[in-house]
Amino acid sequence: MNSTFTKILRIVLGLGLLFFGLSKLLHFKIMPTHIYTGDAAIFIDSLSNTGYILIVVGIFEILIGALLVFNKWVPFALLLLAPITVNILLFHLFLDTPGLIAALVVVVLNVILIYKHWKVYRPLFI
């Protein structure tokens, strides 16, 4: 559960979540801008127009990323991340296929880390 491989995956996932969570709140100009088109643009615009959804998602990503990076409550953080991961995957699968590879990376990292902590989750299924 605490192998070097698991530590690297946990830190990589945590840093990615910190970066993307902060970018939702601070609007970094570091990376090239990905412009959503069609239904993806309509969906993101509607989330943005609510005034709170993207902020809440960003805060959750920052919180979960910090928990993963600092190795605190990792099973809980992974459990919180699961529905966000599913939504990231579904958004890129159905609305923005160019971002599908990044979404799959997040899914794979989350699934591997959940598998590595499975003994903690086992009582939930008894």
Image: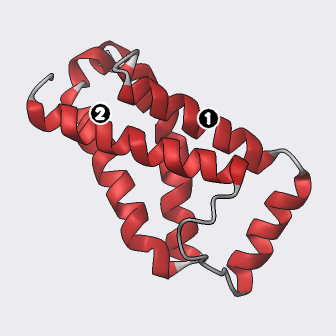
Quadrant of image for the N terminus? top left
What is the number of the mark on residue 60? Answer: 1
Give left or right: position of 70 versus 85. Answer: left
Is 83 in front, or is 105? 105
Furthest residue in direction bottom, as rendered:
38
Give left or right: position of 19 versus 50. Answer: left
Examine the rendered structure and indicate whether residue 11 appears above or below residue 21. Answer: above
Q: Position of residue 3 (x, y in %)?
A: 9, 27
Quadrant of image for the C terminus? top left
Give left or right: position of 2 versus 82. Answer: left
Q: Position of residue 99 (x, y in %)?
A: 47, 73
Furthest residue in direction front, as rendered:
30
The residue pinned by badge 2 equals 114
How would you rate the neighbour count of disc 1 (Cα within 10 Å): few for under 14, some for 14-19, many for 20 or more?
some
**Which residue is found at the position 15% from the left and 22% from the top?**
2
Look at the numbered disc 2 and give the secondary structure of its residue. helix
User: Which of the 4 image quadrants contains residue 67?
Assistant: top left
Examine the rendered structure and indicate whether residue 25 appears above or below residue 35. Answer: above
